[in-house]
Structures are given as structure tokens and as C-alpha cells.
Image: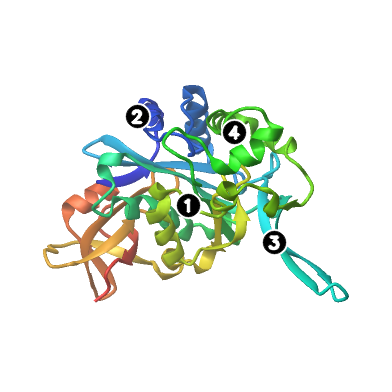
Amino acid sequence: MRIRSIRRDDLPALVALAAQCGVGLTTLPQHEEVLARRIEASLRAGTSAAEASWLFVLEDNNAVIGVAGLEGAIGLSEPCYSYRQGITVRASHQAGIFRTLPTLTLGNDLTGASALCTLFLAPAWRSGGHGVLLSRSRLMFIADRPERFAPLLTAEIRGVNDENGSSPFWNALGRHFFHVDFARADYLRGTGASSAIAQLMPQQTLFTDFLPASARAVIGQTHPSSLGAVRLLKAEGMQHTGYIDLFDGGPILVGPTRSLHTVSQSCVYPVATGCVPDGELFLLSNRRLADFVALIAPARLQDGVLQLDAHTLEQLQLAPHDSVRALALNPR
């Protein structure tokens, strides 16, 4: 099982994954033409800089079972909107009143940040550490070319919606200004209408006390299917600082790109062929831009050289004396 850069012939598999993800994963819409454009953008990313976009797939025996994305910068070609949670204080000493009122302010604060996105693993494979490989492989990719990424890394987390795709936050707020249900709004955003929808939303500061309790309860909350991803990203050093998605109210995690655990703690070693039956488990990547590969495999570090078995080297498309980026998953 390994992560690799997406290819054109992965389009049918990507369409099949999109059909399984349901409502709320905006960047993986059930729209073949949009997905084809995303693949083309990923194939071009090796020659562009700030607005580069990459897609990687997780494959098992040549079957694509997951996808993960990475954006060099957000909000540069069209505005990137989010809500920022805040507090407004109202006080009157004469009347003996002191109130702190929670607020939401629409803004573009995260413009220019890099972003982790489009993380989806087929339901049958959501165990055994596959999500770890899928998510952290992107950080290995960043670690080899930090100059291509912004100092701040963001991750928009899927917010709360029910089995029918209904979002309490959208129903209480966005639906009043853009007269479609959440599933339709999410689809339109995924196919390129995000900025247009955001421009119809109220531009003034919102007092959340005016929202119904069902909407207030999900502000900054995570969809159950994304809880594992949030734990992993927080372990890397990302955190929720009050930014939320303006569609479903889900949290937006942020963190300093170069200080994240995988980026800062992974190391580069020359490789050699060896027998490693008792080796440590490492997250490994081949450090390439266009033909990136990452996987988890046992290895042994000896005298500054990382020994890998022949099959692992073949999977990584490496030869002895090439270099590999490695992160020990359970350091001894």
C-alpha cells in the first residue's frame, strides 16, 4: 500500500470515491469535469508556484482507495472567505450590566495560506493506520520543498451535518441569503461558485445569540467522520484558533508550516538494500515532485544509512544510494 501522485487514468477511480463521500467534502464534488480539471492542475503543479495544487492517491494492489490534496496558496485568484469567532463586550456601570456577546465576522484573513484539503478514505479502509499515511504523506511532500508553501498551513474540517446532508448552521444562516439547501450549496461551492455564494452572505458582524440553539451548538464542531483527522492534525501542531467555515460552521485548523512535527522531525538519508525483519516502522517518501511516492515500511538506520528491503525500494522507485525522507513512527 502506498501514496503516489495522481495520474490522468485515475479519473474513474476518483469519480467513484466522490460518489462515496456524501455531502460536506466540498473539494471532492460528484462532477467528473471538475475532478478532471483538478487532476490536470495537479499534473501542472510542478511548473507553477504559489497557486499550485496537488492530488495524491492511496492505492492497494493498484486499486485507488483514498485521495488527499494540497494547495500552495488559497484566495489569490478568487477571495477565500471564512468566519472568525470573536467577542463583543457591552457594559453599563449605571445599570449594573456587563455582557460578553459571541460574534462571527466574515473575512479573508487566511488569504495566501497553504492548505491541506480533499482528504477522503473509502469506508472499508478506515482502520489499520491508512488515514495516517494518507494525511501525513502531504507533510512529507512539504518538508522537501518548504519554499513552495506559505508560513501558515490551514485545514478546513468538515462540520456537522446529518445523514440527509442537512446542516444546522447553513439552515440557520446561509440558507436565508442563498435560497438552496446545504447539499446544493456545497455542490455549487465545489464546482466553483464559492466566491459568488459568499458575496451574498451578510457582511456585517453577526451576533450568534440570534441563531437558534441547534446552529450555535455546531459552531466549530467536527463531523464524526473527521474526528480522527483532527486528532492527527492536532498532534502535528495544528490548532483551532477561532476560524470556521461559513457554510457548515466546521473548524479551520491552522499551524506554522515548518514547525509541524512531520515537517520538522523527518530526515533525509541515503538508502541501501538490506534485510530488515526487525526494523522500526518509518514513514518514507521518495522526495520527488512529479512522481511522488510515500509509504510505511520497516527500515533500519545504521551509520547514517537507511536500510530498506528490495520490495520497499521498488515501491518507492528508488535505487541504492538515492536519498529518502524518513520519519520514525514509533522511535525506540
- Of all residues shown, which one is farthest toward the front? 95
Residue type at the position of mark 3: Gly
| Secondary structure at numbered mark 1 | loop
- Is residue 267 toward the left or the right of residue 329 in the image? right
Q: CA distance from mark 3 to mark 2?
A: 42 Å
Residue at point 58% right, 47% down?
215
Are the residues flagged by discs 3 and 4 in contact, CB closer than 8 Å?
no
Q: Earlier in the sequence, mark 3 or mark 1?
A: 3
| Secondary structure at numbered mark 2 | helix
- Is residue 202 toward the left or the right of residue 14 in the image? right
Q: For mark 3, what is the residue?
A: 86
Numbered circle sitting on residue 222? 1
Q: Quadrant of residue 100?
A: bottom right
Q: Quadrant of residue 172?
A: top right
Q: For mark 2, what is the residue?
A: 13
Q: Residues within 10 Å of mark 4 (few under 14, many from 20)?
A: some
Of labels 3 and 2, the one closer to you? 3
Residue type at the position of mark 2: Ala
Q: For mark 4, what is the residue?
A: 189
Q: Earlier in the sequence, mark 1 or mark 2?
A: 2
Of labels 1 and 4, the one closer to you? 1
Residue type at the position of mark 1: Thr
Q: Position of residue 48 (x, y in %)?
A: 59, 42
